[in-house]
Amino acid sequence: LVRKAIDSIGELSAKAQGLSKPITSHAQMLACDNRLYLSVGKDSLRGLLRVGGRQLFVHRKQSSEYVQTSPLCVLDFFVC
């Protein structure tokens, strides 16, 4: 039941964003350390929020070199 719900809302998210395939699925969540928050209504899944760390390179100051950081990022979201 949970697997089907995550796959289904992942497909809806991909369609809403115009993506060729979902970026959130049950299988993908098992293979990573991202967190998935689900909004559940009385009888249905209402939305999802997927977050996880990503390695980014940023300038602390305009004249400085790039610095690597790993912030918590929103990777996917969808609200029905």
Image: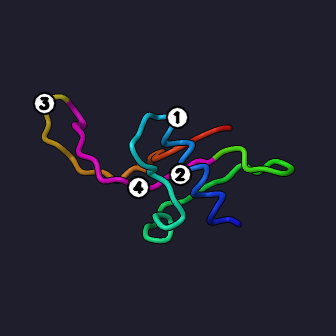
The quarter of the displayed image where residue 13 is located? top right
Which residue is painted at 71% across and 66% down in the image?
1
Amino acid marked by disc 3: Ser
Element assignment for label 4: strand
Q: What range of the chain is rendered magenta?
A: 48-61
Amino acid marked by disc 4: Gly
SS majority, magenta: strand
In the picture, measured across the screen, residue 58 lies left or right of residue 25, that is: left
Which residue is painted at 53% across and 48% down in the image?
11
* Mark 2 vs mark 3, CA separation in Å: 34 Å
Lower sequence index among marks 1 and 4? 1
78 lies above or below 7: above
Residue where numbered disc 3 is placed: 63
* Mark 4 vs mark 2, CA separation in Å: 11 Å
Which residue is painted at 41% across and 55% down in the image?
53
* Mark 1 vs mark 4, CA separation in Å: 23 Å
Q: Which percent across, then down, holds residue 47?
A: 66, 44
